[in-house]
Image: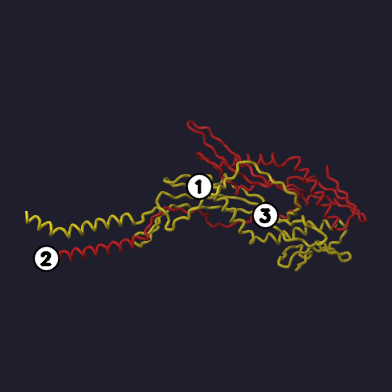
Chain colours: A yellow, B red
Amino acid sequence: MQKNIIMMRKKKPIIIACCSVLVLFLLLVTTTKCSSQDKEPAPTTLAQGIDTVPMLIMQVQKCSKLYAAEYRVHKIITHDDALRLKGQLMSKAFDLKVPLADRKIAIPMDAKIKAYIDFSEFSEKNIERNGDKITIILPDPQIVMTSSKIDQKNVKQYVGLTRAHFSDEELASYQQQGREAIIKSIPEMGITETAQANAAKVLVPMLKQLGYEEQNITIAFRKDLDVRHDFRELTRIND
Amino acid sequence: MGNKIKIIIGGVILVVVIVLFFWVKSAMKDNYISLSSSEAIEPTPTQIQSIKDIGEWEFLSVSAEEMVDTVRKGFISDDELVRIYYGTLRLGIDMQKMEPGWIVTKGDSLEMTLPKVRLLDKDFIDEAKTKSFYESGKWSPKDRETLYQKAYRQMIQHCLTKENLEAAQSNGEAQMRNMMQQLGYKNITIRIEK
């Protein structure tokens, strides 16, 4: 009996230590983060109730715009939707491509971009006369994407065995991104300069019909707009 | 003496375990695993296919959004696809089709013959702006093309109305009259081609 008590006393620190280890281990397990989400949690936002009302909306607007240049552009929107397993374990980062989980799509699209001169504010201020000579000072050309068309027949897609097909919402999102990319590339196209020159091509014959000699007609633009066209001699740069 | 040693050993083990706990915890603090895929499209070039000189004078723009749907009957449930298309119909005249002598002047009088306003461009839907409203089931590009054609027909029907054409014609006359007045003509007569 006394021997058992001595043995118990001998084992007591070991039992206490084991219990402590067990408690600490449980604490460790419960407090360690194991998440299937990104490292930085996405900010939580309240739903804003932005659903579009399902109805036909029509807006009619009177205007006076002279469209002078039309660019037809083509773009193939591509999206490679490979599924990746990313993470960090014991300070070691990893980024693995999940096999059989590829999705790829190519969407060809065409768009029309037009440049116009707004004549709705046209007034005496836009006209300068000096004897037989006339100068028309035009406002800055504005650029707009008037239409876009998805070449549905030639859309190509590949979907891996473990993935779902591209949803209509995803397709719409890619198309909208492609549209934005086209709009961003507009300044590199030189459509403004083309529009200036072409506006002169429309206005000069009209002014000739009114009795002005071609050499007496000037179409003026702002200083920062450079004109590169055959009608250059008919244009002037204003401050 | 023996007990003291055991207590010390127990204490040392406890300290080691605590240190180990905090070390492991700090090492695992930044652990995470995520499955992700990119939502962004890849950068591809935008090719200019053609540049055209045009002379389209727009007098009325009709912007429309059209919700169209298609339903496929199924054995258990029906599949449905609903999309919202956006487009702008531009009404006006084509200045490049003006006949010589469409303006005749005599002193401060001017006579102008304008063509009837029409739809300036048959491509008016901005399909890349389309919103997906609802989808159930699997739909092919051919189905989407059919929906586009349906939206096209509906926009023509709703927007290319007699009232809108008359409003465009009336505004066109007003705009041209104003321009000629600014150019110094007092008596302006505008005729519309039949």
Which residue does the image show at 23% across and 58% down from the upper left? A20
Q: Where is residue B40 in the image (x, y as percent from the top left)?
A: 51, 54
Looking at the rendered structure, the secondary structure element under dot 3 is: strand
Q: Position of residue B8 (x, y in %)?
A: 18, 66
Which residue does the image show at 30% across and 56% down from the upper left? A27
Q: Which image quadrant for residue A223?
A: bottom right
Q: Which image quadrant for residue A143?
A: bottom right
In the drawing, does residue B109 fall left or right of residue A150? right
Give the Cα separation between the discs numbered 3 and 1: 30 Å
**Amino acid, disc 1:** Gln
Chain assignment, label 1: A
**Amino acid, disc 3:** Val
Q: Mark 2 points at which residue?
A: B2
Question: Badge 3 local density, few (<14 within 10 Å), some, or many (20+)?
Answer: some
Residue in front for this viewpoint, A178 or A29: A29
**Mark 1 or mark 2, which is nearer to you?**
2
Chain assignment, label 3: A
* Number of callouts: 3
Q: Which of marks 3 and 1 is nearer the N terminus?
A: 3
In the drawing, does residue B10 fall left or right of residue B60? left
Q: Mark 3 points at which residue?
A: A144
Answer above or below: position of B111 versus A141. Answer: above
**Mark 3 or mark 1, which is nearer to you?**
3
Q: Mark 1 points at which residue?
A: A157
Question: Badge 1 local density, few (<14 within 10 Å), some, or many (20+)?
Answer: some
**Amino acid, disc 2:** Gly
